[in-house]
Image (cartoon, rainbow, N blue to C red):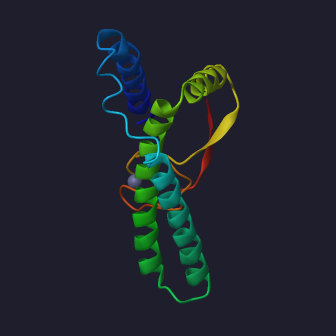
Amino acid sequence: MLLGIGILITLTLLVLVVAPLLAPETASASMLPVDVTPQIDLKRRRLVLYENLQDLEFEYKAGKLSADDYNALRLDYTAEAAQLMAVSQDLEITSTEEAFIERAVAARRARPSTQSVPDYTCPKCGFENPLPVKFCGECGAAIVPRERKV
Ligand SMILES: [Zn+2]
């Protein structure tokens, strides 16, 4: 999963770097006007999603939701959040050169580090859940976060 994203990012960067060199006139044709920023729309959707998740937690703790409903809704929200994250990561790359440089620096810093990060890989099916989750986004098994060396 992470390797796949890494390859995707690398390919995207390659295309972004090479395409303007090959076709300088048409390179910006696919860009959206500045006033129609998908970043803002995404940010709004993520905020809404975040609020929905908080409401969900609150209602569950208040006893207004059954565990089944809670788990089902939480899985929905988690899947949507993962999707939004993937989209916004693509947008971050294309948005500005600064973002590109920041990401490159962050990636370089992250690689040789030996610090631990929580691992939400499912013990049952092996799916690498991209977010802190209590239940696997693939099979629904309970996730116990473990520390993983990076
Ligand atoms: Zn699973």
Identified at 37% across, 34% down, the residue is 31
User: Residue shown at 45%/34% (left/top)?
Assistant: 2
> Where, by quadrant of the figure, is residue 148 drawn?
top right
Residue 32 x %, y %: 38, 39
In the picture shown, does residue 114 fall above or below 128?
A: above
Q: How many discs appear?
A: 0
Q: Does residue 68 appear in the picture of this structure?
A: yes
Which quadrant, please, contains the C terminus? top right
Q: Is residue 66 left or right of residue 23?
A: right
Q: Quadrant of ligand 1?
A: bottom left
Residue 16's spot in the image, x, y percent?
A: 39, 21
Identify the residue at horizontal 61%, vertical 82% (top origin): 61
Q: Is residue 64 above or below residue 149?
A: below
Left or right, residue 145 beside residue 49: right
The vertical placement of 8 against 146, above or below, is above
Q: Is residue 128 visible?
A: no
Residue at figure coordinates x 59%, y 71% from the top left: 54
Examine the image and state in which quarter residue 55 appears.
bottom right
Q: Is residue 15 left or right of residue 105?
A: left
- Judge by depth and name the residue closer to the eye, 86 or 128: 86
In front here: 85 or 34?
Answer: 34
Quadrant including the N terminus: top left
Indicate the quadrant where residue 9 lies. Answer: top left
Q: Position of residue 114 (x, y in %)?
A: 69, 26
